[in-house]
Amino acid sequence: MVTSPMPTLRLLCTCLLLALAGCRSLELPPVQPIGTVQGAGAESPLAGSPVWIEGVVTAGLDGADGAGGVFVQDAGDGDLATSDALFVTGMPTVATLPEVGQRIRVHGTVGELDTGGGARLTAVRPEQIQRLGPGAVAPATLLAAPYDWEAFEGMKVVIVAPLTLANVDDAARRGELLVSFDGPLWEPAERAAPGSDDAVALASANAQRRLVLDDGRLEENLPTAPGPLPEGIERARAGSTLEDVAGIVDHRSGTHRLQLTATPRLLAAPRPAPPRVGGDTRLAAFNVENLFNGDGRGGGFPTERGARTPGDFSRQLGKQVAAIHALDPHVAALMELENDGHGPGSSIDALVTALNAGIAGAPWRAIDAGQGPGSNAIRVGLVYRHDRVRPVGSPATLTGGPFDALSRVPLAHAFVALGAGGRRGEPFVVVANHFKSKGCSEAAGANADQGDGAACWNPARVESARRLHAWLQSDPTASGTDQVAILGDLNAYGQEMPLRWLREAGWKDAFDGQPGAYSYRYDGERGRLDHALLSPALAARLRGAAYWHANADEPRAAGYRDPDSAGTPWRSSDHDPLLLGLELAP
């Protein structure tokens, strides 16, 4: 008997038609929802296991040595605790990456990719990738900072809430911006005692509210334009806001970040005018950020801590002069001056000469403390307007204990304010101070960082505060006055023990009642390192206190190494100057 070939031929034709129609059910194995691969924890429950996943490519990262790859997202598994996206790694160049908007099916092994700084990113290292045609997924909408970024790892998101710019200093080199949800970040030790429950809670809230916006490139120092970062962002002030932020949630270099897929809209914060305070006598404090003038004759560059070239120093000096003239104080306490004497060729002499340039009568003068004060590479100083105040008596300095080797030697001098007809007011004392910094080199024992938020050298700063108080109680200037101002960079935030101790000893914080006051920004967080503490008698004459945010909110790019910034006060230092107004003239 002869068998008809028709059934076999009909079956072959049917299969061919199905294949041509796009039916892949006969050739593709089943996939797992990406949410089950991610899991609800920090690491995938399927690490080390082979899987098939399917989703839409939402973004690609080009990286050397196999660090590149694509983010793939599916429609979701219905579990809000699990992310619906992950990273497909091991594709070194953009040319090998599936296109954004392409639906792909991937077979590979699940792993936790080490992305630096302790960060781990759930990823699949592919063995097979099949392109299935175009596709799309909707982004998740974030109205506020999520409680757990892990639930969005790898996902496409749109942030509806405006983000506050906290730091742009890594924009040019790394293509990164630090931003925060719900307004600016505050240093916990400015608002609560270090180690307290309130400080710990604020630190935890800061960590949740922080986010890095990345330009979508893994390399640093790229010569090309900064990807989707807003134009001119490297010059934007902290406190500016960003809107229309969209990207992919990534986890690299120790922090969650958003790999931007579009350019956000920048709403730049304006530069503030110099503050105006009441009273007839104005006191100020300026950290001049290592004002070193080489050998004083145009040579000696690069300097030990400051300017690298004569041009750098000229611009640095011009910025300091612009800032001091804008605030127009009558006495200014200075920190981080080069400790090179007081005569011609010294750093402080160069500053006074520049302050007097073009002003009739050359009113600016400096207190000559003789040697030092102290032997540290940097020191404090006092400059004043001879037409508004007059020094009385001799300068006084405090050495020993924590001073000189750790905290810089304080300098105190008495002045009188001049009234109409040259009449003199009662003496008042201004003390310039610069306590030990939070740099932890050589810190040991109790002075080591205790992990409570006060950083290292805290006992040294507390001892500095105690000795300073005891010294001022002894009337070191022999002026007989109880009107004393402690001014300067105490390297301690408002609720750290040195400041708490001085307030408990009776000193009055000139910025009491100003919870929004700040003078410094570290790692994107605001706080006060620069302080004005007044004796009760002098506090009774206070008529106003203000910080001028000409520096802390400005990016490093606006500093004196930028030729375009010459002659401006912006970023004349990394600390904001403070200004006090007092009634002291007769």
Image (spheres, grey):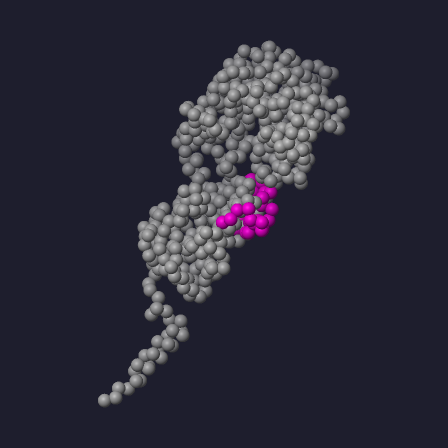
**Identity of the residue drawn at 47% across and 29% down:** 440
Whether residue 428 appears in this view of the structure is no
Is 514 placed above or below 101 here? above
**Identity of the residue drawn at 35% across and 60% down:** 52
Q: Main secondary structure of the magenta part?
A: loop
**Identity of the residue drawn at 38% across and 54% down:** 124
Q: Quadrant of residue 340?
A: top right
> Which region is colored magenta?
218-245
Which residue in the rendered view is the most extreme toward the right?
360
Q: Quadrant of residue 306?
A: top right
**Identity of the residue drawn at 65% across and 32% down:** 313
Q: Is residue 436 magenta?
A: no
Is 256 placed above or below 385 here? below
Q: Is residue 238 magenta?
A: yes
Q: Residue 301 at x, y = what percent? A: 64, 31
Q: Residue 573 at x, y = what percent? A: 60, 32
Is 73 placed above or below 422 here? below
Q: Residue 141 at x, y = what percent? A: 45, 52
Residue 313 appears left or right of 105: right
Whether residue 56 appears in this view of the structure is yes
Q: Quadrant of the C terminus?
A: top right
Q: Residue 558 at x, y = what percent? A: 62, 39
Q: Quadrant of the N terminus?
A: bottom left
Which residue in the rendered view is the most extreme toward the bottom?
1
The number of callouts visible is 0
